[in-house]
Image (spheres, grey):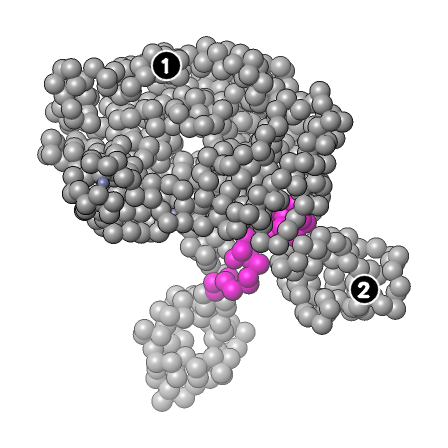
Amino acid sequence: MIAEVIVDITSSTTDKIFDYSIPDGLDVKVGHRVVVMFGSKKVDGFVINIKETSNYDLDKIKDIVSVKEAQPLLTQNMLRLCFFMKKNFYLRAIDVIKLCLPPIVISGKVKAKYIEYVLPNFQSIPVLSQKAKEQIRLLLFLQERGEVKKEIILKEFSSSTLKNVLQKGFAIIKSVQEDRKPKSTFTVKKKEIVLNKQQQEAVDKITKSKYATYLLHGVTGSGKTEVYINCIKNALKQGKTAIMLVPEISLTPQMFARFRNAFGDTVAILHSNLSQGERFDEWNRIKNKQAKIAIGARSCIFAPIEDLGIIIIDEEHDSSYFSQSNPRFHTHEVAKYLAYLNNCPLVLGSATPSVESYYLASTGEYRLLTLTDRANQKQMPNIEIVDMMLEPMKGNINIFSYRLIAELESCLAQNNQAMIFINRRGYSSFIMCNNCAYVPKCQDCDVSLVYHKEDDMLKCHYCDKRYKKMTVCPKCGSSSIRYGAVGTQRVVDELKKIFDVPIFRLDNDTTRNKNSYAEVLEQFNNTSPSILVGTQMIAKGHDFNNVTLVGIVDADVSLHFSDYRAIERTFQLITQVAGRAGRSDSEGKVVLQTYFPRHYAYRYASTYDYKAFFKREINLREVTKFPPFVHLLRVLVISENFEKAEIVLKNIYDEINFLQQTYSSDFVYLHAMKCPKKRIQKNFRYQIMMRINKKNQATIIPKIYEICDKCKQNKVSIFVEDDPQNLS
Ligand code: ADP
Ligand code: ZN
Ligand code: ZN
């Protein structure tokens, strides 16, 4: 028999399938990882098909050397996904396989953890001389206790006693695999919940459904998670399994606890905060069907699960569902295909669906389900917009408005908690010489350096390079230095000057190590009154009962990005953050500080009018010809050598321009230019932006890939980004 094998050679761009013959006596199945000879080297490969014979010269076909694991690593679903992604995202098969298998599984460095137990051997009747007192004592101990962990025995008895008893066959050793289960320190109270009418309707429709995509639109706190839980319960009842995806940052300890409460050990969690061992075990628990529900971030869509009854993507609008670096793919598209393969429903849930998804729901391609009210019957918190332009006229030059200070005072006086949101970490976004306006920038990147007060350093947020703080301007010698827009550290500093309550901070700098994220959240949860300051990390998923006030220090941070999604993102972020207030019995309140108080993103966010926002935004996209009405494509050309990059850019542009002549009516826009961030980590960055009519995209996009392939040159990287989420 012949096996078709995808070989794992990272250095090469080879994406071919090779035939190897299966030697007699070797049990090779589809999905197995095998060792094969490739040239003169032994490499790993994956068996994707087994056939009778080969088109190649049978004499020249080499044998498979060995099989690496007893069970195949790749599941049926993974193999089919592999071909789907190869075709739709232009990826190499081996790269897709590596998405499916966590590095820890591939490396084979982590092994299952075994615990040894000692138990009496009832088959043999102990014959011992009275002198062997210790051995007799051990046997009596075992007879009384049954099986005992070896480590406990060794505390009570010497190792030679145990050895003797084992050698004589009076006792035996049993090894049991123990799972390193991720511990959740968080506990949430179990609540008996009766679904309301809209929730029940959603659950019923989804449960009955075969393959279809549902968009579950429900305000924050409307009980979407309860809908997911009930749909999953129904899927399990039918003997099926489930995948639920959440953005990495909203995979909070509370979320863990909630699903553990509902499903116990049948749920496995794949999270980047797990230790290697924990991740290995959680993955294996899914693979060997001990766990029937896989919850995790984007890559959990590749969990080794079969027989899916439902796939859920929570916070479906989140940009983390698009992988930005290679291999690039869109999680929604992968999920749709997987749902199709399993003939099961896909549920996209959000309080602020992406404009694309809501558009598809409006055209009938998705089925819309709506939850209109908060489950606790409380109103959404009132959002008060404060015009920061007017504060100086009132004599306030602080970073907090008078309104926000007043609200903070009353919130804390009532022993409640507040969350202060600022989507910028560090102390200030840049520092500047007051005399000559010099701004220190990173040597390797085209960005200004961010001041971090804690380590009194300037840091580049693109490459992490650190620099000494500027105390004297290197250009003009002035020592009058001004701080730019505020970040989380500065907000904490300023709050400390005003309020005498515990203040916690949550951002990328405070959560570098594995457990600090959960620790900060737990401390905050247990401390009232208190304030939590954070970046978008605090915007999602958290459910703190005592939070009655949310302050948004600078809502405009994301409003002016040069990205057609900037306004949508701002609207989404504000709605999400606002949703953190007033989740239990007490009423919530939001103070939003901005220099653009009349912007429609704020107007519709403050009235929680998603539909009005959508209408406005979708009209704009239609008129200006942006997605979802056209397809946006960017070719990125990157090199340390800008001359080389410019040559490659020109070659690609010329070819695409030529293509445009054939398909002139399909190109809405075509332009080559420098990227907004002209240089990152020493690399010069250029781009070709294209907007293409959807009608002919299936013909045009493959041609773009072909062109880029043809124009490849040494030391220049080319990336085709299909609907890029980040246009920096
Ligand atoms: P979402 O996921 O939409 O933000 P959740 O499912 O987290 O909403 O629900 C918000 C809160 O309301 C949770 O504490 C949840 O336990 C509670 N809840 C949800 N549905 C109901 C219901 N039908 N009756 C009572 N409480 C509910
Ligand atoms: Zn200066
Ligand atoms: Zn840098």
**Type of amino acid under label 1:** His
Is residue 383 in sight in this rendering?
A: no
* SS for callout 2: strand
State the image coordinates of residue 518 (x, y, percent, origin top left). Answer: 32, 44
Provide the residue span drawn in magenta: 87-114
Tell me, yes or no, whether the highlighted magenta stretch contains residue 88: yes
* SS for callout 1: loop
Tell me what residue is drawn at x 88 percent, y 69 percent: 59
Q: Nearer the viewer, residue 634 or 455?
A: 634
State the image coordinates of residue 465 (x, y, percent, origin top left). Answer: 35, 51
For label 2, the crowd category at 10 Å Cα-Cα, with few meaning under 14, some 14 to 19 and many 20 or more, is many
Residue hosting label 2: 21
State the image coordinates of residue 671 (x, y, percent, origin top left). Answer: 59, 30
Residue hosting label 1: 599
Left-right relation of 348 to 53: left
Tell me what residue is drawn at x 62 percent, y 58 percent: 10
Q: Earlier in the sequence, mark 1 or mark 2?
A: 2
